[in-house]
């Protein structure tokens, strides 16, 4: 199954080498962090290889595999649709029923209250993989070797205090996630 998933991702992104390189970077980083923090590396691999599967699909394609509640919940944060739809496709097309993997994919954009270690690893790996280059990335890479919680707090705090970084229309939710980390 892992080989089929990996090959399908490779084929999907054959014309987008930068995104594929990013995905492979997330895989490498996630597997490394999983070994460091005692998480099943196969779970980390599957979540990482599939996390952006629908990233460049149009919104209507992404939402076509979601239930109406997910669409309504994230209507103001459509960047979430690619994460949710990738998890839905992994479950329905590849018959992956492991909720740990599915949730790690669903919540890799900015996390959730009650994150598992795998959730944290995939979120962090997506933000610090080797092709990422932004002012805070070197700090986050170093911090990820010491504390997943602190890494996420620093990243999310940066996200809410620097609106130019993008998709923060849900600042209240992100602040709630920050508050919940380490509780």
Image: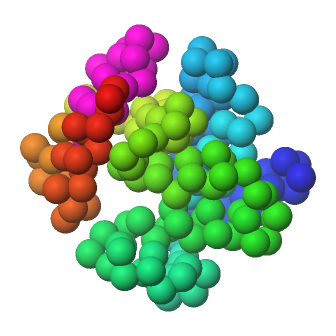
> The C terminus lies in which quarter of the figure?
top left
Image label count: 0
Bounds of the magenta span? 137-156
Vertical placement of 61 versus 101: above or below?
Answer: below
Looking at this view, is 76 or 100 the one in front? Answer: 100
Work out which residue is located at the far top of the displayed protein and give it: 146
Q: Is residue 14 visible?
A: no
Relative to 104, is 41 on the left or the right?
Answer: right
Vertical placement of 124 versus 94: above or below?
Answer: above
Q: Is residue 107 visible?
A: yes
Identity of the residue drawn at 89% across and 52% down: 1
The overriding secondary structure of the stretch rendered in magenta is helix
Relative to 171, is 87 on the left or the right?
Answer: right
Rendering coords of residue 75 (x, y %): 32, 79
Rendering coords of residue 101 (x, y %): 66, 48
Looking at this view, is 48 or 178 the one in front? Answer: 178
**Residue 85 occupies which quadrant of the picture?**
bottom right
Rendering coords of residue 179 (x, y %): 22, 37
**Residue 167 occupies which quadrant of the picture?**
bottom left
Identity of the residue drawn at 69% across and 70% down: 89
Looking at this view, is 176 or 45 the one in front? Answer: 176
Identity of the residue drawn at 46% across and 71% down: 81
Vertical placement of 42 versus 165: above or below?
Answer: above
Work out which residue is located at the far front of the displayed protein and give it: 183
Identity of the residue drawn at 17% across and 56% down: 171
Looking at this view, is 135 or 76 the one in front? Answer: 76
């Amino acid at each position: 199954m892992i080989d089929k998933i990996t090959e399908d991702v490779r084929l999907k992104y054959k014309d987008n080498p930068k995104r594929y390189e990013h995905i492979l970077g997330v895989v490498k980083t996630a597997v490394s962090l999983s070994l460091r923090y005692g998480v099943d590396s196969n779970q980390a691999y599957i979540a990482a290889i599939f996390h952006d599967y629908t990233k460049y699909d149009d919104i209507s394609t992404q939402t076509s595999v979601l239930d109406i509640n997910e669409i309504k919940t994230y209507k103001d944060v459509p960047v979430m649709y690619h994460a949710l739809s990738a998890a839905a496709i992994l479950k329905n097309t590849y018959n992956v029923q492991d909720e740990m993997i599915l949730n790690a994919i669903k919540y890799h954009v900015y996390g959730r209250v009650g994150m598992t270690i795998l959730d944290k690893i995939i979120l962090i790996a997506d933000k610090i993989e080797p092709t990422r280059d932004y002012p805070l990335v070197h700090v986050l890479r170093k911090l990820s070797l010491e504390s997943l919680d602190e890494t996420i707090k620093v990243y999310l705090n940066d996200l809410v205090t620097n609106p130019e970084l993008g998709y923060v229309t849900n600042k209240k939710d992100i602040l709630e996630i920050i508050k919940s980390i380490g509780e």
